Image: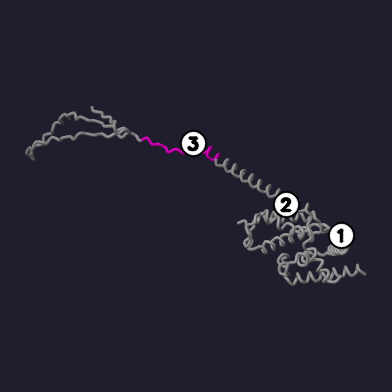
């Protein structure tokens, strides 16, 4: 057999049929493995989602519950003492005599000055007023 | 995305049906048995599925399939010794004596193709599958010079075997 004959034989082989059962087996096996891969992907994705959900859920559960709510500060009621203006009595204009010792002014009894205490509460409509 | 540009939209299933014979036959020619060829063909199509059907054209798709097929076959021959005797392909219903003689010659030719895996792959792709030397070189990851040399050596060797048997 020379080279030309060999090449012709090779060419003859080019389109030789392949056993049908081999083709069927390959096709079925490829289909099966593709579906397996698909399911594996689905399961892995689902597992990953579950794990992620558990982590987030656990984090939310373990976090202190009230820490999330803003703390409402209760301000102490403001106490303002309002005093009425005190009138200072004008002293009588007396000539100063250098020789004489100035008379010691007798302490005059202090007149009772009315004092009132105004207490404001958080409610702007409610004001506590203490009057002596 | 699922298309080979230059063709009508082709689903993976369509490509599988159109190319399975090519892949299976090539793997069988290189490996020498159908069981291994089927395993390789499965792996080739799974890789194609994973990769996606985005090729510049049909020739690129064919080239990619040949390359992967040959690489998987070479990997397999590295781990397991290929069978020296190649079983015949499905025999055709030819009753004529010439057809029987031709079948016998083909069988002998394939049996004589017990070459190193890369040389054998070069002969299969160039002579049986009808690829160009450049395409074979690309599939094998070799230079064109190397491919020509491998094919030439293989043909000389085959001729020697046949001449010895004919004497």
- The chain that hosts pointer 1 is B
Residue tagged 3:
A65
B11 with respect to B147 (left or right): left
- The image quadrant that residue B74 belongs to is bottom right
| Magenta region, residue range | A57-74
Disc 2 versus disc 3: nearer the observer: 2
Residue tagged 1:
B95
Disc 3 versus disc 1: nearer the observer: 1
Element class at badge 3: loop
Alpha carbon distance from label 3 to label 1: 90 Å
- The chain that hosts pointer 3 is A
Relative vertical location of residue B146 with respect to residue A110 in this rendering, above or below: below
Q: Position of residue B45 (x, y in %)?
A: 70, 55
A62 or B160: nearer the viewer: B160
Alpha carbon distance from label 1 to label 2: 32 Å
- The image quadrant that residue B82 belongs to is bottom right
Residue at image position (88%, 68%) is B162
Residue at image position (91%, 68%) is B166
- State whether discs 2 and 3 lie on one chain: yes
Quadrant where the C terminus of chain B sits is bottom right
Residue tagged 2:
A27
Quadrant where the N terminus of chain B sits is bottom right
- Looking at marks 2 and 3 on the same chain, the residue that comes earlier in the sequence is marked by 2
């Amino acid at each position: 057999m020379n080279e030309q004959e060999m090449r012709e034989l090779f060419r003859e082989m080019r389109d030789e049929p392949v056993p049908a059962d081999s083709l069927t087996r390959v096709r079925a096996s490829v289909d099966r493995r593709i579906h397996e891969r698909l399911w594996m992907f689905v399961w892995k994705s689902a597992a990953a989602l579950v794990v992620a959900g558990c982590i987030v859920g656990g984090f939310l559960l373990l976090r202190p519950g009230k820490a999330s709510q803003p703390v409402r500060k209760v301000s102490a009621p403001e106490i303002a003492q309002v005093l009425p203006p005190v009138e200072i009595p004008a002293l009588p204009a007396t000539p100063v005599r250098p020789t004489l010792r100035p008379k010691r002014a007798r302490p005059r009894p202090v007149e009772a000055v009315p004092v009132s205490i105004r207490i404001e509460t958080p409610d702007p409509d409610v004001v506590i007023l203490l009057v002596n | 995305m699922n298309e080979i540009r230059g063709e009508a939209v082709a689903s993976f299933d369509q490509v599988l049906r159109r190319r399975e014979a090519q892949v299976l036959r090539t793997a069988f020619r290189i490996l020498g048995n159908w069981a291994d060829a089927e395993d390789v063909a499965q792996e080739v199509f799974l890789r194609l599925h994973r990769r996606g059907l985005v090729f510049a054209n049909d020739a690129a798709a064919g080239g990619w399939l040949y390359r992967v097929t040959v690489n998987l076959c070479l990997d397999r021959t590295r781990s397991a010794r290929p069978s020296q005797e190649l079983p015949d392909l499905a025999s055709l219903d030819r009753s004529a004596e010439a057809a029987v003689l031709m079948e016998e010659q083909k069988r002998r030719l394939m049996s004589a193709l017990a070459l190193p895996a890369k040389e054998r792959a070069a002969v299969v792709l160039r002579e049986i599958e009808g690829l160009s030397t450049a395409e074979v070189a690309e599939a094998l990851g070799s230079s064109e010079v190397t491919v020509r040399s491998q094919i030439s050596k293989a043909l000389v060797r085959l001729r020697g075997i046949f001449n010895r048997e004919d004497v």
